[in-house]
Image: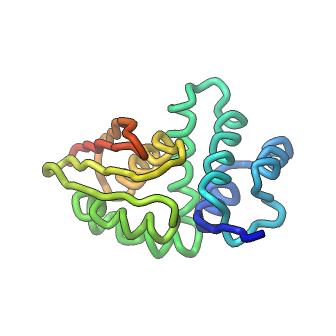
Amino acid sequence: MTLTHEVSHAMFEGLFARAVTVSAELARELKACGYDVANPDAGASGAVFSACVEAARRNLHPTKSPDEGQRELGRSFVRGFRETILGRVVTTALPILGPARFLPRVPGRLGSLRSDATVSVLVTGATSATLHFADLQPLASFFAGVIEGALLYSKARAPRVMVTLEPGGYRLDATWES
């Protein structure tokens, strides 16, 4: 059996070891999905990460809509990821870069975290950009929250990310105030 590590351990660590409190019940659900918080691996497949995000959403945000719950987890992930070694390296320059210079760097950043998804970025104006994700996992709202959270760290005011599902992925239209 070959274990596929499409999603870096840093994604799991940022969310489940740093950003959120994992109850015993959530730990059991995550293990059933393929991720053991007590014995973390080097990473896992995109399907495992997606299932874990959904389990966390149900457990931590049961009263929110699925989209809003995943978006909240994405924002939480950014806070937790900043506490990881890789996250400190990746996010230290956000306030210096600002949103318009940070967003074009997202493809490289995502590439260091996920080999099963790609993103292209088009800066469409002084305070807007469109991100096209080729991603077979249902993580559009999670990554909308990630982009919103990262925009806040890059000193964008009032970031908003609209999600549009597309065949084989999704589009995130980001806007902010300067």
| Residue 120 location, quadrant | bottom left
Q: How many marks?
A: 0
Measuring from the top left, give residue 92's x and y in whole percent.
41, 71
Residue 75 can be seen in this image: no
- Residue at the outermost left position: 125
Residue 85 can be seen in this image: yes
Measuring from the top left, give residue 124's x and y in whole percent.
16, 49
In the image, residue 89 sits, relative to residue 132, either above or below, namely below
Left or right, residue 96 beside residue 145: left
Q: Residue at x 76, y 66 (%)?
A: 40
Camera-side residue of 28 and 87: 28
Q: How is the image coloured?
A: rainbow
In the image, residue 72 sits, relative to residue 66, either above or below, namely below
Left or right, residue 2 beside residue 147: right
Q: Residue at x 45, y 68 (%)?
A: 111
Q: Residue at x 48, y 71 (%)?
A: 112
Left or right, residue 135 beside residue 69: left
Measuring from the top left, give residue 10's x and y in whole percent.
60, 67
Left or right, residue 44 beside residue 67: right
Quadrant containing the N terminus is bottom right
Measuring from the top left, give residue 153's x and y in whole percent.
39, 57
Q: Residue at x 65, y 59 (%)?
A: 18
